[in-house]
Amino acid sequence: MSSLKITKKHHRHLNNPFPSAPKSLPFVQGTLFSESLTLATHQTFPIGKDFRLTWQSRNGGFLSVSHRLQPDKSLWSTIPGQAFVSGALAKTEIQESRGSFVIKDREVRLVCDHQTIEDIRVIDHLDSFLHATDPDFPSGCVGFDQNDVKKTEFPVLMITGRIFSMKKKRPQDSSLSKKMTLGKDCTYARYWVFFGQKSSHQVGFQVRLGKPNFNLSQAISPAGLRRRQVLRLKLCQLRKKKLGWWWSFRRPRNYVAVSSAEDEIVGVKPPESTEFNRICLTYSSEKSEKFYGFGEQFSHMNFKGRRVPIFVQEQGIGRGDQPITFAANLVSHRAGGDWSTTYAPSPFYMTSKMRSLYLEGYNYSIFDLTRHDGVQIQMHNNSIEGSLVHGNSPTELLEHFTGTIGRPPELPEWIISGAVIGMQGGTDMVRHVWDELRAYDVPISAFWLQDWVGHRETFIGSQLWWNWEVDSTRYWGWRQLIKDLDAQHIRVMTYCNPCLAPAEENPNRRKNMFEEAKRLGILVRDKTGEPYMVPNTAFDVGMLDLTHPDTESWFKQILQDMVDDGIRGWMADFGEGLPVDAKLYSGEDPIVAHNRYPELWAKINRQFVDEWKSNHGEAEDPEDTLVFFMRAGFRESPKWGMLFWEGDQMVSWQVNDGIKSTVVGLLSSGLSGYAFNHSDIGGYCAVSLPLIRYHRSEELLLRWMELNAFTTIFRTHEGNKPSCNSQFYSNHKTFSHFARFAKVYSAWKFYRIQLIKEAAQKGLPVCRHLFLHYPEDDNVHKFTYQQFLVGTEILVVPVLDKGKNNVKAYFPVGESCPWQHIWTGKLYTNQGYEAWVESPIGQPAVFVKAGSLVGETFLKNLKDLNIL
């Protein structure tokens, strides 16, 4: 990425508590011109054997892609008369602060917003393809090498033409004017668009821009350019002074200024880079179309009307909920985040009109859905590649998408059999709590002991020594503790991440893994060649260079040592914080590698699990399988990750970063291929400031237990400030409630096993937004956190507001079976019907399909466990 400025904000202790949205390129709009001599008014071209592209010249001309069996259903179409490929050259600024990133467009130097279509060519076989490109076709174009082409089903379609920025007023006729000479009247560049069938339900597309033809003979001198810029600035200030407040009111906000077409090119000196670093793909949408997906999103389900950035980072503390976002932003630059910040974005969506698209690669991109009639993907690159997905239902679209990117393996039965007890404190504390859990007859899958490496207090709260070995003082008799728990079929899980903290001050260390990794040269480096010390929460750490060939074996040995002690699972934390100015062994662009890093992190962990299983064999115990769970991810993380959790929510009832946001994250990630996901019971982040206090209340904890009893994993977390929070072991009431809902969770284990198998085979999530099965019901599109499905047979309407004892349940259109309330047995038979349902603590609103095998079995199990 050229013309780049990176600003570090790690150590700014007083910041703007209300930061504005980053300035970015506005929705680029231009005119489409067609070559009337080569393109007929209406033509249809084949794409492979199952798809076709249609060109129509009416209304200025447009393209449409469809499946041969449904020719009237458009998978993708351009906006009539408008350019669908455009390019820009802009300066970029990235602000970075402790895992949070803001990417801005600082100055747009060139926009080629108009487009010609000069030829649409059908390429029937490989040899024709290899010779079809003209001499100007750029070498090294991603996705167009011979090996990739061999995988494509012919015929392939190639569209060629030019994008340009006109100096003169554009002609009224959308056909190419013989009087308009590209090069004299404008600056232009060649482009190439390819469509090729990848499978019976996917069409791949690839777009590449050539270099713009700056007319150097007409460029003004640098001094002249500076004088012109000063004059423009003075005129702008004069205009602003005359218009007063009206200037501020009418000026578009959060968009970087773009020069007009008349001023754009001929008299401007070419920028330092002569290649585009922005490419835009624009196409049509319907006003009523709803957009779902984009990875794990915490604030919204439908993104129509929004600009969605795709960049891995910390989700933020508060994400717009007040007053915590104000406080977080004040003390740490943009630490509060906003509605768009997430650990696990994905450049994928599906819509209510059964259209779906995903991008390849890892470059930063923005999906601009702000226009009612169009979509624009803006990518920081000079090429873009992706696929259109064909399907007749949301489940088909998701199945086809995950069939390409990959699906998780089946989880072992041990981790879904009971509660995962997340706690800290050392051997004595674990044994004490274990005794109490047995007294309350709590079904337990595992103890997750994140402080196995040792504990230290920081201003954040209770934190860990990031030196991945057991603290034998805190956890004396470590192997015996694991052995005793295993004798009762309870596993032990631990914690690790791809970072290492200097361990000189750790009194209980045996190794100093930071120094070892530094000596081996497997840490990410800074511009001086030294290990990059990354500020992270309350201390600085070194980060493993996952592109280095020696990193994989070195870290796998750490995992092997854990497993040799008897560990059977771990949290693989972080992965979202690779610095954008780091130096990697691979030499790749760190900004692009940033989005790839969490996939590499997942891959190393997954490979170890698979290798261990292969070496260990299943003869001894088929259930003796390893599991890891993680929070950071990107498009293909579902392929490598086994299990996900939603990160560090606030211990609050709030919408953007509290209990409600965990439901949105659960459902949005499920629509993006993350089949197995869950949150910390009770949330994680507590705050104790003089005027701002976020402590986990008992009521919040109890309601969170009820919610998570219907997710893939039922796992507790003490939070960053355990002493400030209500815990499951706080008193008899919390212990009893925890035992009750651990049993509720166990009661539908039989169905959970079915759903896990289905997820591994089809990519469908355990927890589902109603859109997935009732897309024709317009009412389901309004739901975010209010209710969700477990598979197809259980409907959950959780209580997510303080002091509430009833909820409004909606029973969707299209379901023939009545819904039966599990606590009272009441049947709800009307479709498209809302009803208020009593939901006292201990009896959340949960419904099953009346008479179904799953419903009857679940109710029977609840009775056998003395819950009903």
Image (cartoon, rainbow, N blue to C red):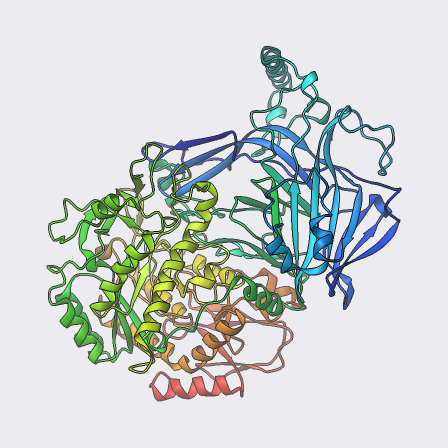
Res. 128 visible in picture: yes
Q: Position of residue 319 (x, y in %)?
A: 43, 47
Q: Nearer the viewer, residue 288 or 80?
A: 80
Q: Position of residue 27 (x, y in %)?
A: 65, 39
Residue depicted at x 34% and y 43%: 524
Residue 783 in the image: above or below residue 299: below
Residue depicted at x 35% and y 70%: 714
Residue depicted at x 68% and y 40%: 137
Q: Position of residue 283 (x, y in %)?
A: 70, 48
Residue 832 in the image: above or below residue 100: below
Is 657 placed left or right of 360 in the picture? left
Residue 560 in the image: above or below residue 159: below
Residue depicted at x 32% and y 64%: 701
Which quarter shows the C terminus?
bottom left
Q: Position of residue 382 (x, y in %)?
A: 60, 39
Is 855 placed left or right of 292 in the picture? left
Q: Nearer the viewer, residue 501 or 766?
A: 501
Task: Count how many numbered circles sit on residues in the image.
Answer: 0
Residue 706 in the image: above or below residue 647: below
Q: Nearer the viewer, residue 763 or 856?
A: 763
Is 253 placed left or right of 48 in the picture? left
Q: Nearer the viewer, residue 463 or 861?
A: 463
Q: Splitting the image into 4 quarters, where does residue 572 fall? A: bottom left
Res. 287 visible in picture: no
